Amino acid sequence: MTDAQPLVLAAALLDVLDPLPHPQRMAELASRARRLAGQGVLRPVLEELADGDPYERRIAVVAASVGRDTEWIGAHLTDEDRVVRGHALRAARSLGVPDEVYEEAFTDAPAAVRRQLVRAIARDGRTALADRLLPTLRAVWGDAEAARLLPGCSAAVVADLLPGLLRSVDGWSSLGHHHPGPLLDAVTAELAALPAAERDGWWHWYGYDRGIAAVARPLPHRVLDLLEQYGPARLPGSLHRSLGHLAAADPTRFARLLLTPGGCAIPERALSRTLLHRLVAGLPDDLVAELGRAIPGLLPRLLRVLAPSRRAAVHEAAVAGRGEGAEVTVDTALLDFLPRTYAATVARRLADRARSRGADRATVLRAESYLPFDEVRERLLAATREPVAEDRATAWSLLVHSAVRSGEQGAVAAVLEEMGRLRNEQDPVRSVALRALLTVRPALFTDTVEPLLDRIATDAVEARDSSAATRSALTALAVAVLREHAVTGERSLLNWALRTLVRISGNSGSADLGRLDRTLRRGQEQVVLEALRPWLEAGAERSDYGLVLALARSLGRRAATLPGLHELLRQAVDYGSAATARSAVGLWLQGAADRDARVERLLTRDPSAATLPAVERVLTTRRTDLLDA
């Protein structure tokens, strides 16, 4: 081969690659690299490209990886270009670059490159190399540099050296992932050697707590041992996310840890709903009740995650033996999670106690609202006519919630009938009543209550003192009804929901349908589209695509499965206003199988669309050939 041939081959390769979109460019590069390797001329081409600009050098490292040029890849493990270096390190494992090349690379490598080499050694499982390198790194660059190599070392080396390097460790997660046992051995030994008065502060030094968090999943029982023996008075925040693994491994021990006086205090906010669900599933009722008694404010949350059949027994056990005290309160959060019949029994007891102790009317009424709806309805209605606006607002809220708890459509219809009186109410009262309606399950609304809902919405929007809070509550109610009844087919309620959204926003362009993709079951998006199609097409005829855009946004990626909706989005791009078209482009491209062709068509019609984020992403990742068009 003459000296000119590599230059010619490299130039020919670049000329072929330059006009291609990125995916095709990489495929063509791989094909040609294999061909050049087969012909035995890949290395000279790589050397020619390596003398070029960054783009050419990055083309070279990809070609070397595909052409399996192990020697060239090994020579570029410390390349000055971060991208070239990273690709070479990723390719080195599959190509079998020998350990000796890594050892040579460490000789003159700067700190940033050394750390990248260390991560690659641990990731590639070069244990023998890591064991050999660690003493050298420690002697030349110190403990901190050596500690970074520990995740890649053998368990025996880690067990031997970690106690001396413990306070130099930085990558706790990696070390805990690779060597959970030696890490726990080292921290346990250190804690055991400390005076009891100093152990609490130890947990907050040097990031040790992050190391414990890293091993909670593989070795939860040993972490529980550590917390029981040497746990701090206040658990570090880094361990909060690992509590679920401890609770799932041994619910009883975890519960005892929570209950130990002066032991490892865990903030209530760290006890997530998922964690509590795992915990109570493995605990007997008496221990769940003990947790509810011991930790203030936890009982309602425990009841919420318990099976309904266990809630009454746990509540009885939790409140048994409690002194009633002088203060009369009604914990509605607690009552909400009790079975309906049992909640009525508890509420009746609370109401009698409140009356006997001279509590105010609002407290008594709050307890009575948990009684059967027919029993308490008249008292709640009378309270909605109180002279004080705040009392009326509270009464409306309690009345709605009482009807909701009954689970009866007739009770909900009766309350909606009474809410016609809100026309003459002050907005603060009206707003509270409408927010309470958001707790009604949309399935409890039927076509027969549509006139009642329409009157309530009309009065609220047309009121002179109508507030943003009132309109927000109405919007949320309309969206909830739309989600439910676009699937069930209640045409009158569907009409009401759409009319209300347009009435509040002034036009369909401001409609917000929420996240339907998170609430609809699979396949229901097609039902929703068919239910809304008359309004979508009617708006399109007026060049109003606001509802089309709102529906596409609310369906997210599911919109790509609806050809009818994509056709309406295409019309919005082609015939909508400039602002509408720009908003519609991203939705029209999202998830489309022919996205590349759509971008090409769009740029032919409007070159300025290249600046839109959705179009720019396609141009820079898939259709780079259109960048110079």
Image (tube, rainbow, N blue to C red):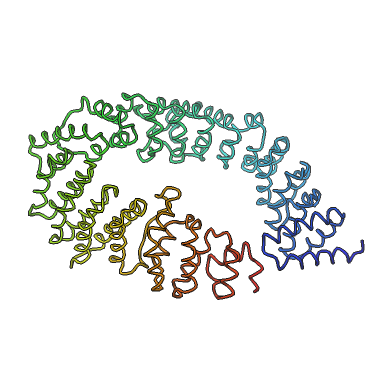
Q: Quadrant of residue 363?
A: top left
Residue 390 lies, with reference to residue 582, above or below; the image says: above
**Which of the two residues, 486 or 255, is positioned nearer the viewer here?**
486
Count of numbered labels shown in the rendering: 0
Image point 9% across, 53% down: which residue? 385
**Which of the two residues, 261 or 377, is positioned nearer the viewer here?**
377
Image point 79% across, 48% down: which residue? 70
Residue 613 lies, with reference to residue 323, above or below; the image says: below
> Which quadrant does the N terminus fall into?
bottom right
Residue 620 lies, with reference to residue 438, above or below; the image says: below
Q: Is residue 162 shown left or right of residue 196?
A: right
Image point 70% across, 43% down: which residue? 140
Residue, far right: 2
Residue 252 lies, with reference to residue 604, above or below; the image says: above
**Which of the two residues, 3 or 42, is positioned nearer the viewer here?**
42
* Residue 174: x %, y % from top left: 59, 40
* Residue 407: x %, y % from top left: 24, 42
* Residue 290: x %, y % from top left: 30, 26
Q: Quadrant of residue 316?
A: top left
Q: Is residue 124 shown left or right of residue 509?
A: right
Q: Is residue 227 shown left or right of residue 298?
A: right
**Which of the two residues, 535 or 243, is positioned nearer the viewer here?**
535
* Residue 495: x %, y % from top left: 30, 60
> Which quadrant does the C terminus fall into?
bottom right
